[in-house]
């Protein structure tokens, strides 16, 4: 059962979702790249995920 987490079927494309974690890795890389002028303030994102979400355990490992 757990091996199917994040692999939701996408109707109309016959594909599956990779889940939220790969996209969060992109956001993290973006935040590390972006700052507010000369390194004065680092970029940041806040992400909240409901505890019932299928990807919660992988999310907590980030």
Image: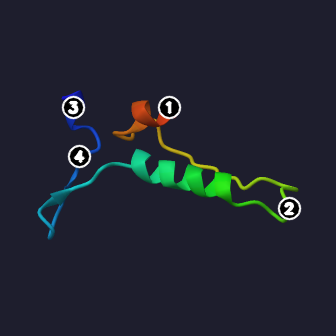
Judged by depth in the image, the label closer to the viewer, 1 or 2, is 2
Q: Earlier in the sequence, mark 1 or mark 2?
A: 2
Report how far apart the C-alphas of labels 4 and 3 lie in the structure: 9 Å
Q: Secondary structure at mark 4?
A: loop
Q: Residue 47's spot in the image, x, y percent? A: 58, 49
Dots 2, 4 in contact, CB < 8 A: no
**Circle 3 residues within 10 Å: few <14, some 14–19, many ≥20:** few
Q: Which mark is residue 6?
A: none
**Circle 1 residues within 10 Å: few <14, some 14–19, many ≥20:** few
Q: Is residue 6 left or right of residue 16?
A: right
Identify which residue is drawn at 69% across, 53% down.
Answer: 44
Q: Secondary structure at mark 1?
A: helix
Q: Quadrant of the N terminus?
A: top left
Seen as rendered, the residue at the extreme left is: 14
Q: Which mark is residue 3?
A: 3
Q: Nearer the viewer, residue 35 or 5?
A: 35
Which residue carries the number 4 mark? 7
Which residue carries the number 2 mark? 38
Identify which residue is drawn at 77% across, 53% down.
Answer: 42
Q: Residue 38's spot in the image, x, y percent? A: 85, 61
Residue 45 visible in the snapshot: no
Q: Earlier in the sequence, mark 3 or mark 1?
A: 3
Q: Is residue 39 left or right of residue 55?
A: right
Could you say which quadrant of the image residue 55 lies in?
A: top left
Q: Secondary structure at mark 2?
A: loop
Dots 1, 2 in contact, CB < 8 A: no
Q: How many discs appear? A: 4
Q: Residue 39's spot in the image, x, y percent? A: 83, 56
Which residue carries the number 1 mark? 60
Measured along the vertical axis of the image, is residue 56 above or below residue 48?
Answer: above
């Amino acid at each position: 059962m757990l091996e199917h987490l994040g692999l939701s079927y996408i109707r109309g494309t016959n594909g599956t979702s990779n889940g939220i974690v790969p996209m969060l890795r992109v956001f993290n890389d973006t935040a590390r790249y972006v700052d507010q002028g000369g390194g004065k303030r680092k970029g940041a994102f806040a992400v909240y995920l409901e505890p019932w979400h299928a990807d919660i355990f992988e999310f907590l490992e980030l």
